[in-house]
Image: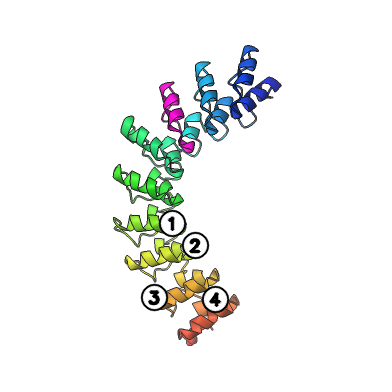
Amino acid sequence: STVLPDEREFQYAAKMNNLETMEKLFKKNVNINAMDTLKRTAFHFAVARSHISAVDFLLHHKARLDMADQHGLTVIHLAAWTGNLDIMRKLVKAGADQKAKNEEGMNVLHFAAQNNSIKIVDYFLQDLHLNDLNKPDGKGKKPFLLASEKGHVDMINNLISLKLFTSEKDKEGNTALHLAAKNGHSKVVEILLQQWEEINDLNQNGETPFYLSIEGGHEKCAELLLEAGSDINVLTQNNSSALQIAIQNRHLSLVTFLIDKNIDLVPKPEQKNSSLHLAVINNHLPVVKSLLDANHDINSLNH
C-alpha cells in the first residue's frame, strides 16, 4: 500500500519533533498510524530519536503502540535500545505489550542488555518484576550472553548483581565466555573468569574460548584464559589447533606467544598438515622463521 503525502509528512514531522506540523496534519485527519514501506510508523520514528514531545502528542492522540515494523520491532524495543527511561515508562503506562518480541525472538531485556541500557533493565526487573523476560532469544542467547558478546562491562556487572549470570550455551554452543573471547572483550573475560567453571567448554565447532580468542587475534584475552587454566592444545572438530589458526591468519605475534607458552609443535596424527607445512604452503615466511627458531620438528613435514 502506498504512503500518502500527508502521511509521509506526518512521519517526517515525528522524526524531527516538529509538533506544529503534526498538529496541522492531525487537524486534517491524517492517519497517525500510517506505515511507511518498511512498516514503520510516526511512533517508531519519535521513539527511536527520543523525541519526548512527539511521543506525548502520539500518546495523547491514542496512536497505536504495538505496531511492528518489517523486522518485528515495536516502539518498546526502540525505547529499550535508546535507553530512554522516561519514554519507556510512558509506553508501559499507556499499555504497550511488555513482552513483545521481534522476528529474532528478542524482547526489551535483550535490546537493553545488547545496548547497555542499564536503567531499562533495572526498571523491568526491579520495578516491574518481569523476570520471565530473561529468556533465550531466537539464537538461544539470554540477555547475559548478548551483553558479553558486545563487551558491556557495566551491564555484565549489573546482570550479575541481579542474579542473571549464566554459563548456558546458545544454539551454536557458545557460552558468554566464548562470545566475549571471540570478540576480544578482555574486561568481560576477566569478570567472567571470576566465577567460571568449565573453561575448556567446546562450542559446536569444537572451539574453546581460548581458541576463539586466538582466532580473533585477541592476545589479552588469550593471556587471561591461559592464566586461568585453558588447555592450549585442544583441537577443533576439523582438527585445527590454535597455532594453525594463528599461522593461517598471519598473526606473527600470536604465533610467537603460543610458542613461548609451549604449545605442541609436533602435530597430532589426526592433523594431516603440520603447522610448519601449512606455513610453507601459505608462504608465511616470518612465521616459518619463528617456528624454525623454536626447533619445530622438521621431520614432520608431510610426505
Horizontal arrangement in the rendering, residue 271 relative to residue 126 (left or right) = right
Amino acid type indicated by mark 2 = Gly
Q: Which residue is mark 2?
A: 216
Helix, strand or loop status at disc 1? loop
Q: Which residue is mark 4?
A: 278
Q: Residues within 10 Å of mark 4 (few under 14, many from 20)?
A: some
Amino acid type indicated by mark 4 = Leu
Q: Which residue is mark 3?
A: 261
Q: Position of residue 288 (x, y in %)?
A: 54, 80
Residue 89 seen: yes
Q: CA distance from mark 4 to mark 2?
A: 19 Å
Q: Position of residue 182 (x, y in %)?
A: 46, 58
Q: Nearer the viewer, mark 4 or mark 3?
A: 3
- Outermost residue on the right side: it is 5
Q: Position of residue 45 (x, y in %)?
A: 57, 30
Q: Which residue is mark 1?
A: 185
